[in-house]
Structures are given as structure tokens and as C-alpha cells.
Image (cartoon, grey):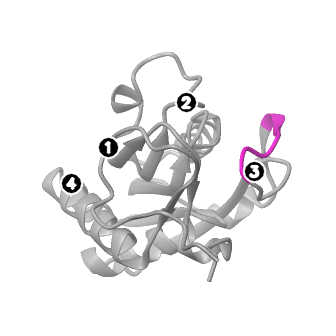
């Protein structure tokens, strides 16, 4: 069985078919995002979007020495498959898990921004909790699915990589062996 293509450098650009990332790619990307975030002042809390955003959120929090890590489940796809169908709007399943964010500098993390709707919806939810600042970070943006109008670099504070294809992360269990 053929080994799927991987990205050892996790660079911008077009790729045919899904892009299969490795754990080394994730380590490099979380290092990049942590460096970008701390350059603008270390956040006080990191929020990961469940499920995929929790792994990079925890890695970034460790890299920054932040102990306040929170999770919120917001979904916009109907399944985990490649090019899965989208729901009409992102849905939050546990918004109370965010707790009190009043006066905190918050970094919101997800693994991928496809259309950008989940990240934008979750950022609005967090802003409604009165933090002093909300910044967003993603491992990758799939420009082929982006629907937020402006260039993703104008909508998301920290982006490790831009691509034009579906991204498969090592924790998704879809890598062929």
C-alpha cells in the first residue's frame, strides 16, 4: 500500500489531494504560532475548539507556560471525512465550558479554518464574555473553502500554513499505514 503524501516542511501552496501532516509538522506549526502570539504579548488563557483545536491549543499553552486552557465544542461539519458536508451554521454544544473570561487576554486556537465560519463564530462567543482581547490562531487555512470574504490573513491573527486542499492531521487516524 502506498504511503500518503506528507509535508515535512508544512509550506504554503497547492497540493493535489489531501495533505497528510506529521507530528513534526504540528510541532513546527505550534512553535511558529506560539512565537507569533508571544511577540504581541502572551495571552492569559488559551481556548481550543474541540476536537481538532485542542491538541494545538495544549501544545501552544505549554510552549507559552500558560496553565489556563479551556475547551469549547463548536462544529460546522456533519462528519470527519474528506470534504465533509457543512451544517448551515456553526453549532456550539457546550458554551458554558468557556467560563468567565472577563478581563483576560484570550488566544483561540483551532486546527483548520476551512470556510472560517467556526473560528469567526467562536471568536464572537468569546467576545461576548468580555475579555480584554481575543486573538485567533490556526495550524492551516484551506483557501479553497474560505468564505469569509477578505484574505484569511486579514481575519485570523496567526496562521501557520495556507493550502488549497483538504488537510489530514495525525490525530484523525486517517493516515494509511
User: Residue tagged by mark 2?
Assistant: 144
Q: Point out residue 150 in the picture as x, y percentages from the top left corner.
A: 43, 17
Residue 89 appears in the rendering: yes
Q: Earlier in the sequence, mark 1 or mark 4?
A: 1
Q: Earlier in the sequence, mark 4 or mark 2?
A: 4
Q: Earlier in the sequence, mark 3 or mark 1?
A: 1
SS of the residue under disc 3:
strand
Residue 27 is covered by the magenta coloring? no
Q: Mark 2, residues whose alpha carbon is within 10 Å: few (<14), some, or many (≥20)?
A: some
Q: Point out residue 47 in the picture as x, y percentages from the top left corner.
A: 51, 62
User: Residue tagged by mark 3?
Assistant: 75
- Picture layout, residue 4 above or below residue 89: below
User: Residue tagged by mark 4?
Assistant: 36
Residue 87 is covered by the magenta coloring? yes
Q: Earlier in the sequence, mark 4 or mark 3?
A: 4
Q: Magenta span covers which residues?
A: 82-89
Split into 4 quadrants, where in the image is the N terminus? bottom right
SS of the residue under disc 4:
helix
Q: Is 111 in front, or is 172?
A: 172
State how far apart marks 1 and 4 are (Cα): 17 Å
SS of the residue under disc 2:
loop
Q: Mark 3, residues whose alpha carbon is within 10 Å: few (<14), some, or many (≥20)?
A: many
Q: Earlier in the sequence, mark 3 or mark 2?
A: 3
Amino acid at each position: 500500500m502506498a504511503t500518503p503524501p506528507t509535508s515535512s516542511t508544512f509550506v504554503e501552496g497547492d497540493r493535489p489531494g489531501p495533505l497528510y501532516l506529521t507530528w513534526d509538522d504540528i510541532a513546527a506549526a505550534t512553535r511558529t504560532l506560539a512565537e507569533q502570539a508571544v511577540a504581541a504579548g502572551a495571552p492569559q488563557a488559551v481556548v481550543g475548539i474541540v476536537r481538532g483545536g485542542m491538541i494545538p491549543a495544549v501544545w501552544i499553552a505549554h510552549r507559552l507556560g500558560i496553565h489556563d486552557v479551556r475547551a469549547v465544542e463548536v462544529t460546522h461539519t456533519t462528519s470527519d471525512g474528506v470534504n465533509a458536508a457543512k451544517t448551515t451554521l456553526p453549532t456550539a454544544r457546550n458554551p458554558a465550558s468557556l467560563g468567565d473570561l472577563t478581563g483576560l487576554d484570550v488566544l483561540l486556537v483551532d486546527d483548520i479554518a476551512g470556510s472560517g465560519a467556526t473560528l469567526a463564530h467562536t471568536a464572537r462567543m468569546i467576545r461576548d464574555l468580555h475579555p480584554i482581547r481575543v486573538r485567533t490562531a490556526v495550524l492551516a487555512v484551506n483557501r479553497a473553502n474560505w468564505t469569509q470574504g477578505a484574505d484569511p490573513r486579514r481575519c485570523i491573527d496567526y496562521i501557520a500554513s495556507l493550502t488549497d486542499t483538504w488537510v489530514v492531521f495525525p490525530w484523525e487516524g486517517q493516515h494509511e499505514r
